[in-house]
Image (spheres, rainbow, N blue to C red):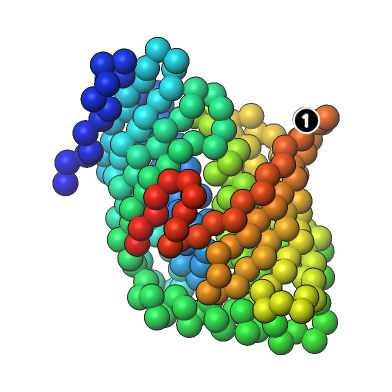
């Protein structure tokens, strides 16, 4: 399929020499946004490969990227191949964070299976006799115990919002470590988490500490609040967002 057409406004010019890594940067940002809006720890996606893309720039050094790429399951089972196709339009506002994103992906997991896996995780978490209290994932040897993998995936889901919000045309993030996880008992049906995550910032190689509060229920919009602080930093950032895959307030998401 041909890549989407670019802006028709004459203020935009086709960028014939794409900056190194720009298409991958746009694809990662689109997937962070997609994962957050989908709100499913069982159907998280990561980038497999960029297929094609184009970019346009204007006099304000703003950049629009139209691209197509493939994705794979974030936590594949052994022998499993789940590849999906996505197309996205990503608008970087110069060096400012929180790119505007429209993204459409083909379904690579049946909706009924995704809902079943999400519900099993939800049921397991609600039945814990004691609220969860985990020190660090992965452990000092880089190992994630299989029993803790759902917690990591749920944390990755909430962190996807933070990583999307912090992404710029030149900076991107990976979740490096999860620590001080606490599950709060509430009267409501939702799973209520408070945790700290270490994000690896590229290309600065800095480690950013973010405290995230996540409220999740399989059939309701994901709620995320966060507060980040850099390694040396007086610099702080915070945000709050409620997202819905059915009726997003920013951008577009489709399965």
Instruction: Give the quadrant of residue 20.
Output: top left
Question: Which of 144 and 105 lies nearest the eye of the viewer?
Answer: 105
Q: Taking 63 as reference, is 232 left or right?
A: right
Which residue sits at x=23%, y=25%? 8
Q: Residue 126, position in %: x, y?
A: 70, 82
Q: In this view, does 55 lie above or below 207?
A: above
Q: In this view, does 92 lie above or below 159?
A: above
Which residue sits at x=63%, y=68%? 216
Q: How many labels does the image show?
A: 1
Question: Which of 159 and 237 lies nearest the eye of the viewer?
Answer: 237
Which residue sits at x=31%, y=19%? 12
Instruction: Give the quadrant of residue 218.
Output: bottom right
Badge 1 marks a residue whose secondary structure is loop
Q: In this view, does 49 lie above or below 139?
A: above
Q: In this view, does 20 lie above or below 145?
A: above
Q: Locate the C terminus by quadrant.
A: bottom left
**Residue bearing the label numbered 1:** 235
Mark 1 nearby-residue class (10 Å; few <14, some 14–19, many ≥20): few
Q: Residue 19, position in %: x, y?
A: 39, 23
Question: Which of 212 and 178 lies nearest the eye of the viewer?
Answer: 212
Q: Taking 57 as reference, is 191 left or right?
A: right
In the rendered image, is residue 169 in sight?
yes
Q: Residue 83, position in %: x, y?
A: 33, 61
Q: Taking 234 as reference, is 200 left or right?
A: left
Which residue sits at x=40%, y=12%? 59
Question: Which of 17 and 154 lies nearest the eye of the viewer?
Answer: 154
Q: Residue furthest toward the top?
A: 59
In the rendered image, is residue 45 in sight?
no
Q: Residue 117, position in %: x, y?
A: 50, 79
């Amino acid at each position: 399929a041909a890549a989407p057409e670019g802006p028709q406004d004459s203020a935009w010019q086709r960028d014939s020499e794409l900056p190194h890594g720009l298409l991958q940067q746009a694809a990662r940002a689109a997937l962070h946004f997609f994962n957050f809006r989908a709100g499913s720890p069982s159907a998280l996606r990561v980038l497999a490969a960029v297929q094609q893309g184009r970019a346009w720039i204007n006099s304000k050094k703003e950049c629009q990227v139209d691209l197509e790429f493939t994705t794979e399951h974030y936590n594949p089972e052994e022998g499993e191949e789940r590849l999906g196709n996505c197309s996205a339009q990503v608008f970087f506002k110069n060096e400012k964070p929180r790119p505007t994103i429209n993204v459409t992906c083909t379904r690579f997991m049946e909706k009924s299976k995704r809902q079943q896996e999400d519900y099993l995780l939800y049921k397991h978490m609600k039945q814990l006799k004691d609220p969860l209290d985990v020190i660090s994932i992965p452990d000092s040897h880089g190992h994630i115990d299989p029993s803790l993998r759902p917690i990591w995936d749920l944390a990755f889901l909430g962190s996807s919002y933070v990583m999307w919000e912090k992404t710029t045309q030149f900076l991107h993030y990976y979740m490096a470590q999860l620590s001080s996880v606490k599950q709060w008992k509430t009267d409501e049906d939702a799973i209520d988490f408070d945790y700290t995550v270490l994000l690896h910032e590229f290309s600065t190689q800095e480690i950013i500490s973010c405290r995230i509060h996540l409220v999740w229920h399989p059939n309701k919009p994901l709620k995320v609040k966060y507060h980040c602080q850099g390694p040396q930093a007086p610099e702080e950032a915070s945000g709050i967002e409620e997202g819905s895959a059915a009726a997003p307030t920013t951008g577009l998401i489709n399965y």
